[in-house]
Image (cartoon, helix red, strand yellow):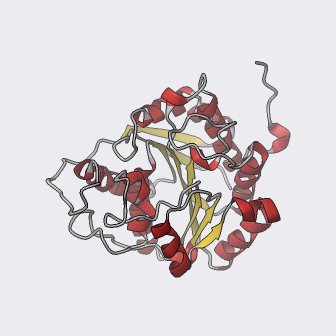
Amino acid sequence: MKQTICNLLGAPVQDGAGRLGCEMGPSAFRAAGIGPALQSLGHGVIDHGNIVPAPARDVTHANPAIQALPEIVAWTEALSQAVYEASAQGLTIVLGGDHSLAAGTLAGHARRAKENGRKLFVLWLDAHPDLHTLETTESGHLHGVPMGYALGLPGFSGAFPPLAAALDPARVCMMGLRSVDPAERRVLAESGVRVHDMRAIDENGVAVLLRGFLDEVEAQDGVLHVSLDVDFLDPDIAPGVGTTVPGGATFREAHLIMEMLHDSGRVTSLDLVELNPFLDERGRTARLMVDLTASLMGRSVLDRPTRSF
């Protein structure tokens, strides 16, 4: 990946999660030094500040479990437009915020790729597939629906904004899954999304699995969006998240993924999501996420600084 302009956009979204705290995520990423870390690698940094949601509309749905639908729709509209505009200026990094924000970022990046005549691939690093629709969600927390929306699954019309371009499931790779609801399992079985759960990672290693996907991105001259959820990581190294699932990726597995992504030169956008500083330990998770971003942007294992605690 060449030196580039990194556009930072804060997305203080917490309405899609089941607890408060994610709205502090953008501030935590900035306090953990994401801007200086990128600049130290020779990249330009433009911090656009925090995105403001669109005016909320009176949006309802028949599913009584759904929570904060008008708020998430408003965020989706604002985020889609914001990342679409920022993507014309270089690489975009959205600082979240819960994973409901991906409904907007995926929609905006898919629109940009379609206009540019490029094929958009997505690497989804998460314990959950977030493949529910407004009809299938039982918890009602809308951080569980962004991938379902971006793939164009039925059940969003009349509530969420129409998609300029839906994702192609054959160009989506999910790694690290270990908590999948029955409705999501059915979609995964039928959709053609590539899935590498934690058992597959244990049996094969992340390098073999990721290399196959990156080879496909290269073969199709695609652009790659990466969505990194804190709960992709094992909670022992990343406690600052409200949806902890034991058995996640290790420190070195996560860094290897980022280093391979850097080597591919295909990443054009990144979402950092589900950081809840209220649940973190003295900024430990925020610093790790910044460190992983630095690996994605060119810091190698030989450059890793020694830290004293």
Q: Residue at x 47, y 77 (%)?
A: 117
Numbered marks: total: 0
Residue 205 spot, x, y in % from top left:
80, 61
Left or right for 229, reference 41: left
Residue 150 drawn at (x, y percent): 41, 67
Q: Residue at x 26, y 64 (%)?
A: 161
Left or right? Give the position of 133 relative to 261: left
- Residue sitting farthest toward the right: 302
235 lies above or below 129: above
Q: Position of residue 115 (x, y in %)?
A: 41, 73
Question: Residue most toward the top?
Answer: 309
Pick whichever, 242 or 194, lies toward us.
242
Please name whichever residue, 267 or 238, is drawn nearer the observer in this view of the structure.
238
Image: 298 above or below 236: below
Q: Residue at x 47, y 35 (%)?
A: 25
Q: Residue at x 29, y 54 (%)?
A: 65
